[in-house]
């Protein structure tokens, strides 16, 4: 199966480009799918779906993050199977906290019910958010990280580990029907995160915890879209509550090694100068 092309949706994104690089290094035929590129793909344009699936044996899936994401994932997954794709690996999330009568992660069900051999990856917050997402990187560059996380902790995971796990599950047997929780090796508060970045860069960077109401006002003052601020308030509110303050063993189970430490990510990133503006 792995002799067939491996499709990578979002192949230029944070995890996708790392998956692509690893697959290519291992000699696999990789089909990089994105909105702009040699293999155009758009969740909103079903005419782009069949061409990227043609002849593929496995696919790395990242959902659209839109309200109809589950419906699109269901249709795409079924088309993938009918096109001959045998293995699907979905980049998902840890279980969202929702009302009892709501489904937590419907995209996962869409992949599980596709008829393909499936694997689901459920990572913690990406360490790379602090260097590759403009909002968080901008705060670090400005020297003050303002977030409604209080003293809550999170097991930040390196995107390099996510990519290693994704490549293993795409190309090796034994991962079908598995949902892997992925985390780093330590629980870190945002204050600790900022301290590590400050030490590695030699800069003065402070962490200022605020209430959700103050963060909403901060977002308005800084021109953030209201829905983006609301989403951050929700997600960081969960960190403040220690909702996901548990270490997971998915990296160890798949790769047989410990996950990379946040300090390793910080050291490698600091020398690039990305946090110096």
Image: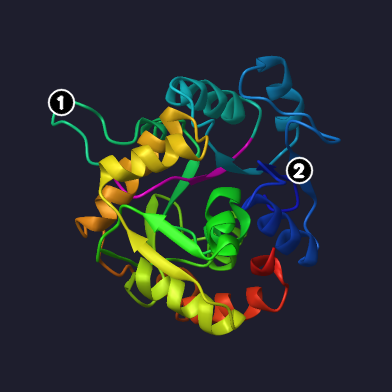
Q: How crowded is mark 1: few (under 14 residues within 10 Å), some or many (20 or more)?
A: few
The C terminus lies in quadrant? bottom right
Confirm or deny contact between disc 1 and disc 2 (CB under 8 A): no
Total labels drawn:
2
* Left or right: residue 24 compared with residue 270: right
Over which residues does the magenta segment extend?
Answer: 85-96
User: Callout 2: 10 Å neighbours few (<14), some, many (20+)?
Assistant: many
Q: Where is residue 85 in the image (x, y as percent from the top left)?
A: 62, 37
- The disc at residue 226 is none
Above or below for 164 versus 77:
below
Residue 246 is a magenta residue: no
Residue drawn at the location 37% of the way across and 54% of the way down: 147
* Near-viewer residue (83 or 6): 6
Location of mark 2 (residue):
32
Q: Can residue 251 be seen in this view?
A: no
Residue 131 pos. (x, y %): 60, 61
Q: Can residue 133 be spotted in the picture?
A: yes
- Quote the CA–CA distance across marks 1 and 2: 37 Å
The residue closer to the viewer here, 128 or 11, is: 128
- Left or right side of 54 for 167: left
Does 90 appear in magenta? yes
Q: What element carries label 1?
A: loop
x and y, in percent, of residue 109 in the image = 36, 33
Q: Is residue 116 above or below residue 69?
A: below
User: Does residue 16 sit above or below 71 in this rendering?
Assistant: below
Residue shown at 38%/75% (left/top)? Answer: 192
- The outermost residue toward the front is 221
- For label 1, the residue is 101
């Amino acid at each position: 199966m792995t002799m067939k092309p491996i499709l990578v949706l979002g192949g230029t994104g944070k995890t996708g480009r790392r998956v692509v690089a690893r697959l290519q290094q291992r000699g696999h035929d990789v089909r990089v799918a994105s909105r702009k590129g040699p293999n155009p793909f758009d969740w909103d344009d079903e005419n782009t779906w069949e061409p990227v699936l043609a002849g593929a044996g496995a696919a790395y899936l990242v959902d659209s993050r839109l309200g109809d994401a589950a419906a699109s994932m269901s249709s795409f997954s079924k088309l993938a199977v009918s096109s001959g794709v045998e293995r699907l690996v979905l980049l998902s999330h840890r279980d969202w906290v929702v009302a009892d009568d709501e489904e937590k992660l419907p995209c996962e069900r869409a992949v599980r019910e596709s008829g393909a051999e499936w694997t689901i990856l459920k990572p913690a917050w990406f360490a790379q958010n602090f260097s590759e997402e403009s909002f968080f990187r901008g705060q670090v560059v400005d020297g003050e990280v303002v977030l409604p996380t209080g003293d809550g902790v999170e097991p930040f995971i390196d995107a390099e580990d996510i990519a290693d796990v994704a490549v293993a599950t795409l190309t090796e047997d034994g991962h079908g029907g598995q949902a892997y929780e992925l985390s780093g090796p330590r629980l870190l508060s945002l204050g600790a995160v900022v301290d590590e970045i400050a030490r590695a860069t030699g800069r003065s960077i402070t962490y200022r915890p605020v209430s959700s109401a103050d963060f909403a006002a901060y977002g308005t003052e800084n021109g953030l879209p209201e829905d983006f601020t609301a989403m951050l308030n929700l997600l960081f509110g969960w960190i403040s509550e220690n909702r996901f303050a548990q270490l997971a063993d998915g990296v160890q189970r798949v790769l047989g090694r410990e996950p990379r430490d946040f300090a390793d990510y910080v050291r490698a990133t600091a020398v690039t100068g990305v946090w110096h503006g």
